[in-house]
Amino acid sequence: MKQKKLELTWIGKDEEIKLEPRILIEDPSKSYGDKNTENMLIHGDNLLALKALESEFTGKIKCIYIDPPYNTGNAFTQYDDNLEHSIWLSLMKPRVQMLHTLLSNEGSIWISIDDDEQAYMKVLCDEIFGRNNFVNNVIWEKKYSPQNDAKWLSDSHDFIMVYAKNKSIWRPNLLPRTEEANARYKNVDNDSRGPWKSSDLSVKTYSAKYDYPITTPSGRVVKPPQSRCWRCSKERFSELVSQNRIWFGPDGNSVPSIKRFLSEVKDGMTSKTIWFRSDVGDNQEAKAEINMLFDTFSFDTPKPERLLKQILILGSSPGDLVLDSFLGSGTTSAVAHKMGRKHIGIELFDHCYTHCAVRLKKVIDGDDGLELTKTLDWKGGGGFRYYELAPSLLNKDKHNNWVISKEYQPEMLAAAMAKQEGFKYHPDPDIYWKQGQSTEKDFIFTTTNFITVEMLDKIHEEMKSDESLLICCKSYKEACDGLYPNISIKKIPNMLLGRCEFGKDDYSLNIVNLPSFEEVVEPEEEPKKEAKKKKLPQDTLFPEK
């Protein structure tokens, strides 16, 4: 009998998606700042984009933040949020799986979610990350004023679910100490070690050895509260008294407490799980930031920069790689940039370049005008590279046969085949058939030419005895097959058929027709005709790394 397990099920859960590993094409006209930057802004379906990142970034992302559509039943401007639970879960599952793959072993993921899907998302993430890697459910106070027109209770918070890739080794960073926290430390007895704060001397975990009477300086005998004991042995307590680390109150008659000195506390504070708007901002602050950045842009679910700052402090350090695959208004990338993190942002809709890119340019120029910029004393610098997803490698011709897409020039085809076969595309400047490699001695060569025995002989003569080569071509002479044991030959597109879904460009959460971005921003104007996609020059398709 098959052992059953506790799991969340829904219609379509077991339908596996075979994603095509696309290549990313940089558009230098939309990139900005430092040309050698590792920061990326990707325009396209986020599931395909995550798959495109898989070969290079598996296990390399330190901190992931996502703010997916909540499935609340409200028609948002940018996202169709009115999805059935099963559809929503089916759309979220492969994305969370891909994010888990990209996350480093020392990394964490932070997911904004509300009451409608929080419980479902929790069980889904338990399955993917493992329940033992659940860290906490943070409560974020998103509103200040109650909604008096609410039918039931006025919601004032959202959740931020936190998972670690490996909770046994992941630890959050400390939050910077605040003046308010430091002000709790006083020096009422003029101790030479400076300000201190009294702390409970008793603990919940009971031990008979640590349960003993204490006589205060006034002569009063005290014992630990019922079912509790002191946190130290009788001998250790005597040592603390001799070191003036025990406080009995100003009259020497109080229950003893231990003195914690400000000079000895940690450099930061451990984060609590309730985050108040006064500390990390709220919806109103987030929308004010968006209005300051964009006169004609309204995004219904932005997050305040201070909220992202707190997440990135806890989940990353300067130089770490941060990812947001639901970039929205671009907050995560903007805050990560100002905090010295490397970042990758993915956004499906056109505001990726009309607003996310514009926002990042303002950050790079040091003139976005937002409060966090002043707080961090950010002066500008850095850059980002703008990418589009390449079209599908294969499509069907008029006879319903799979053929190589016409957009694929030789270099694009070589890069795409390298990704398909698990090779890193890196053409050798001197040896034409070394277009990419999977190991130091294993290479790939893609060509649209007909491969003959003579061509194969010449390549083999140039190869070292311990090298191997995979040749991908449209056709080859039958005698080439198996001619050399260290050279394999496969035909395109036959070698690719059945391994993934070609010709599909949209796995988005947008399952109904939304108004175009132009219509949302300027409803009084006639819809603009869709501009023809600018064809990028070939030398921009594969920029030097």
Image (cartoon, helix red, strand yellow):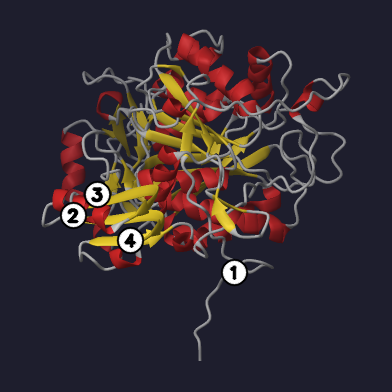
Mark 4 vs mark 2: which is more N-terminal?
2
Q: Nearer the viewer, residue 47 or 183?
A: 47
> What distance separates the C-alpha of mark 4 from that of mark 2?
13 Å
Q: Position of residue 153 (x, y in %)?
A: 79, 44
> What distance separates the C-alpha of mark 4 from that of mark 3?
73 Å
Count the labels in the image.
Answer: 4
Mark 3 vs mark 1: which is more N-terminal?
1
Q: Secondary structure at mark 2?
A: helix
At horizontal 51% and vertical 92% (from top left) the residue drawn is 1
Q: Which mark is residue 14?
A: 1
Mark 2 vs mark 1: which is more N-terminal?
1
Looking at the rendering, in which quadrant would you find the C terminus?
top left
Q: Are marks 4 and 2 in contact (CB under 8 Å)?
A: no
- Foreground mark, 2 or 1, reads 2
Q: Which residue is mark 3?
A: 232
Q: Which mark is residue 460?
A: 2
Q: Position of residue 372 (x, y in %)?
A: 51, 16
Q: Position of residue 148 (x, y in %)?
A: 85, 34
Mark 4 vs mark 3: which is more N-terminal?
3
Q: Which residue is mark 4?
A: 489
At horizontal 39% and vertical 25% (from top left) the residue drawn is 176
Q: Nearer the viewer, residue 138 or 239?
A: 138
Q: Nearer the viewer, residue 491 or 118?
A: 491
- Above or below, 50 against 166 in this view is above
